[in-house]
Amino acid sequence: MDEGLPLQAPLEAENVFRGLTDDQLARAARSGKRIRIPLKSTLFRQGDPARRCYLVTRGRVKLSKLSETGKEAILRFLGPGQMAAAVAALTDTRYPATAEAVEPTEVVGWDKRTFLRLMHDHPPIAFNLLRVTLERLDEIQQRYLELSSEVVERRIARTLLRLMRHAGSRTRSGVLITIPLSRQSIADYSGTTLYTVSRTLTAWGKIGWVRSGRERVTVTDPHALVLFAEQR
Amino acid sequence: MDEGLPLQAPLEAENVFRGLTDDQLARAARSGKRIRIPLKSTLFRQGDPARRCYLVTRGRVKLSKLSETGKEAILRFLGPGQMAAAVAALTDTRYPATAEAVEPTEVVGWDKRTFLRLMHDHPPIAFNLLRVTLERLDEIQQRYLELSSEVVERRIARTLLRLMRHAGSRTRSGVLITIPLSRQSIADYSGTTLYTVSRTLTAWGKIGWVRSGRERVTVTDPHALVLFAEQR
DNA sequence: CGCTCTATTGATAAACCTCAAATACAGTGG
DNA sequence: CCACTGTATTTGAGGTTTATCAATAGAGCG
């Protein structure tokens, strides 16, 4: 199967360790604990005491929040270079979300004390982390606005475009989203149901905007999808 | 009219300058520019180049995001001690939201260079700001989940409870929300329409949960509202 | 080849928005 | 003090969107 070429730089923008020398970086990495997360198991669970924060080094995790009624909202997917649960280092709290591996994943985990020392010794880390957090804050605020103001098909379009930019891979037939992505996942990301997603993807398949299969979506006409998502 | 006693501590938790001596704090304040914002005018507008970040010192501003179709989503209200547009100090960007005074307001504004120096000279500022940003991130993520999973009346209940905690004042008859709050504002905060808010408040008025008038809401039975908001 | 998980599709219903019109309220100036 | 004006609010009727439920089909795996 043609997996194509990665579309985006390896998430440089979210690199919290930018500004450190290779030596400092290596030492920082050694100060944490290397952990392997098998497919579909959780790195941490919403509500558990937050003891560690993590940096994803390989693979990909799904960060999501669950309601008491069992509904799931996907906040984002995190790939290599991205941090999770930074809040664990700053406050004495519980994990506000759940992180589950959607690919075989490797992370480095630091306990509160260690990561605080790291930030203390290397001020760029704190600044980078602040910048990344502000970016994520704005992104979810934007999605919050969309959820309250856009109709469902538009939200699905924006979801596919986001995932495409985040984890897209150019192939012969379009841009493949390289995350195992069920209709349910797309629904949890877009704030709708799997039925609506299914109907929508079927319709878009017919007009050639996407090709979709079991847990796979390829955006075959990104331009059309952008126009549809942005139209007033 | 009985304005009652403020319900919450003056937003200590969000104080970005915690950990500085009075002297350091006074100097930090002097390094910024004191600005007066009249009622209903904007501190900054979504899309404008982000040159300054601000600390609210008096009054209250509404932070909101606008869609191209004219819909408004209220992100939060900011009172004394709370920062706005910190992103201006960290990245070269445009304001991601609009801040409008809902009371006569005073702020201190710092340009990028000055605030960066401030953070550099006083590491606690960066840490506090990071903590505050992470808290806000989780709050909006929680609201994002609610918007995608809760029915509208429950969201309205949660909105009133949030505003009550944030800007509530205990009075003879209940907890008055001390922000001028139209049905439209409540709708923009809850992700619904003013009509639905109006009907809901009328119903809750009849069963004694709230008392509402022109741009005023008093929660007369907080306990009932909590039960309603949290029930499974 | 059967089992399990995922996806499709149709029918139905519920939730909520939209529009229109009437009413209440607060402030202003005579 | 009162009429006037501009908002804010209420309320009803009707329609749209989207969720829900049920049943079937398809894909991948051992």
Image: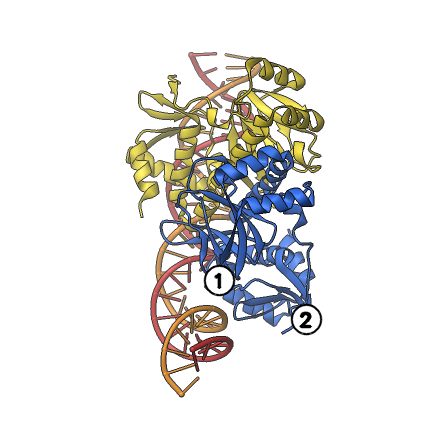
Chain colours: A blue, B yellow, C orange, D red
- The quarter holding residue C12 reads bottom left
Amino acid beneath label 1: Leu
Please state which of residues B100 and A128 is positioned toward the viewer in this rendering.
A128
| Residue at the spot 68% in from the left edge and 25% down from the top edge | B117
> Percent from the top left, x then y, of residue A191?
49, 54
How far across and down, in percent of the image, does residue A176 sit?
63, 65
**Residue depicted at 55% across the width and 58% down the height:** A153
Residue marked by disc 1: A39
Residue position marked by numbered label 2 in the rendering: A173
- x%, y% of residue A28? 59, 43
> In the picture shown, does residue A70 fall above or below B102?
below
Q: Which of the labelled discs sits on residue B173, or is there none?
A: none
Against B54, is B162 above or below?
A: below
User: Mark 2 belongs to which amino acid?
Assistant: Ser
Say if A70 sits above or below C12 in the image: above
Q: Residue at x 44, y 29 (%)?
A: B166
Chain letter of disc 2 in the image: A
Label 2 neighbour load within 10 Å: few <14, some 14-19, many 20+: few
* Image spot of residue B201 (x, y percent): 37, 36
Element type where label 2 sits in the image: loop
In terms of sequence position, does the residue under pointer 1 or pointer 2 come before the other?
Answer: 1
Q: Is there one chain holding both mark 1 and mark 2?
A: yes
Query: The numbered mark 1 sits on a residue in which chain?
Result: A
